[in-house]
Image (cartoon, rainbow, N blue to C red):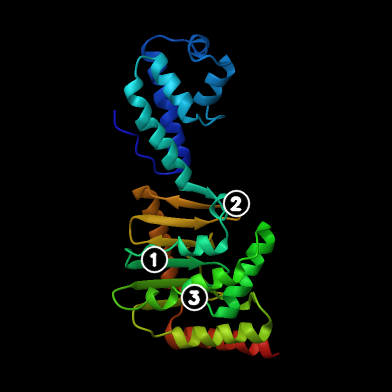
């Protein structure tokens, strides 16, 4: 048997549970009998089948052995491990510190990025004070050790490479993000000035979706499309990796529709200058 092909964490765990259930049914084992063979409580069998409990590697090996299919265990274990990389809680992602996370989050092989942001400016357009402000907020909110300066250095090492050479980066952001300071207002104004200077750079498409535009898609969570093979979605509690082709297509379709509602070039600069005026009011 080959490992099931997971698209999301939920689908991966369901694929494993379904295979374990079919394996048991194929040889006529009841849940109680399988539990006895595996030396655990019968309720555990039902919790695994009904996705209430994620089986550990030892559980999967015991289950497969009880059903006479020990050769299938490693493929199922690998699927369960893969599922853990598709849904990563921030507490686990940041367990080694902000600096380590920043250094490990760049895909050097990817040449094409599409980014949609409903609030925080994408990392490739951040100034140092803005980056520091964001990371300090993450550090305090997540109750992490203070390695903010190390993380700032790690993050600032990326931007120049993000939209130069053969890289292509398309960024869409809501106009409201221009009015969400992550630093003191003078530093936020510097960030807005930096956005002005970024518009028109080779390899970078930068669009702003105005407040009053007729929206083809409602505002959604921030996401990064890495080429056409993966989308990383940022929620409050976790980073979700989407690898299913049909789901990726949904995100890319949403991006394309929102791109048509965005303003670019001089019109985008006018929106930024309006936000700059608000900083000085």
* Residue at numbered disc 3: 156
Does the CB distance between marks 1 and 3 fall below 8 Å?
A: no
What residue is drawn where x is 49% and y is 87%?
Answer: 196
Give how far apart the Cα atoms at labels 3 and 2 are.
23 Å
Disc 3 element: helix
Q: Position of residue 212 (x, y in %)?
A: 56, 74
185 horizontally vs 55: left or right:
right
Q: Earlier in the sequence, mark 1 or mark 3?
A: 3
Q: Residue 122, can we see it? A: no
Q: Are marks 3 and 2 in contact (CB under 8 Å)?
A: no
For mark 1, what is the residue? 256
Give the camera-side residue of 280 and 101: 101
Which of 252 and 77 lies nearest the eye of the viewer? 77
Residue sitting at x 68%, y 58%:
143
Horizontally, residue 234 falls left or right of residue 29, namely: right
Total labels: the figure holds 3
Sequence-first tag of 1 and 2: 2
Looking at the rendered image, the quarter that the C terminus falls into is: bottom right
Look at the picture and state if 69 lies above or below 7: above
Residue 66 percent coordinates (x, y): 42, 14
Question: Taking 24 as reference, is 205 above or below it?
Answer: below
Q: Position of residue 203 (x, y in %)?
A: 34, 78
Q: Is residue 126 above or below residue 220?
A: below
Label 1 and label 3: CA atoms lie apart by 28 Å
């Amino acid at each position: 048997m080959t490992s099931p092909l997971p698209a999301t964490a939920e689908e991966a765990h369901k694929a494993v549970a379904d295979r374990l259930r079919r394996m048991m049914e194929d040889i006529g084992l009841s849940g109680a009998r399988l539990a006895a063979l595996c030396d655990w409580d019968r309720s555990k069998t039902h919790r695994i089948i009904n996705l209430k409990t994620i089986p550990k590697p030892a559980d999967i090996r015991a289950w497969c052995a009880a059903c006479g299919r020990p050769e299938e265990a490693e493929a199922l274990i690998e699927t369960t491990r893969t599922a853990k990389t598709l849904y990563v809680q921030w507490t686990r992602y940041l367990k080694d510190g902000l600096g380590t996370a920043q250094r490990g989050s760049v895909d050097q092989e990817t040449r094409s990025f599409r980014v949609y942001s409903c609030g925080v400016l994408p990392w490739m357009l951040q100034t140092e004070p803005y980056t520091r402000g964001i990371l300090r907020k993450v550090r305090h909110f997540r109750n992490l050790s203070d390695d903010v300066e190390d993380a700032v250095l790690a993050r600032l090492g990326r931007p120049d490479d993000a939209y130069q050479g053969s890289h292509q980066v398309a960024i869409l952001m809501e106009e409201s993000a221009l009015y969400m300071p992550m630093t003191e207002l003078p530093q936020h104004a510097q960030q807005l000035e930096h956005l002005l200077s970024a518009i028109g750079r080779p390899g970078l498409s930068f669009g702003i979706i105005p407040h009053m535009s007729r929206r083809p898609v409602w505002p959604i969570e921030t996401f990064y499309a890495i080429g056409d093979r993966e989308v990383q979605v940022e929620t409050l509690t976790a980073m979700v990796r989407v690898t299913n082709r049909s789901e990726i297509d949904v995100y890319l379709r949403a991006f394309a529709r929102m791109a048509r509602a965005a303003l670019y070039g001089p019109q985008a600069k006018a929106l930024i200058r309006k936000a700059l005026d608000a900083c000085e009011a």
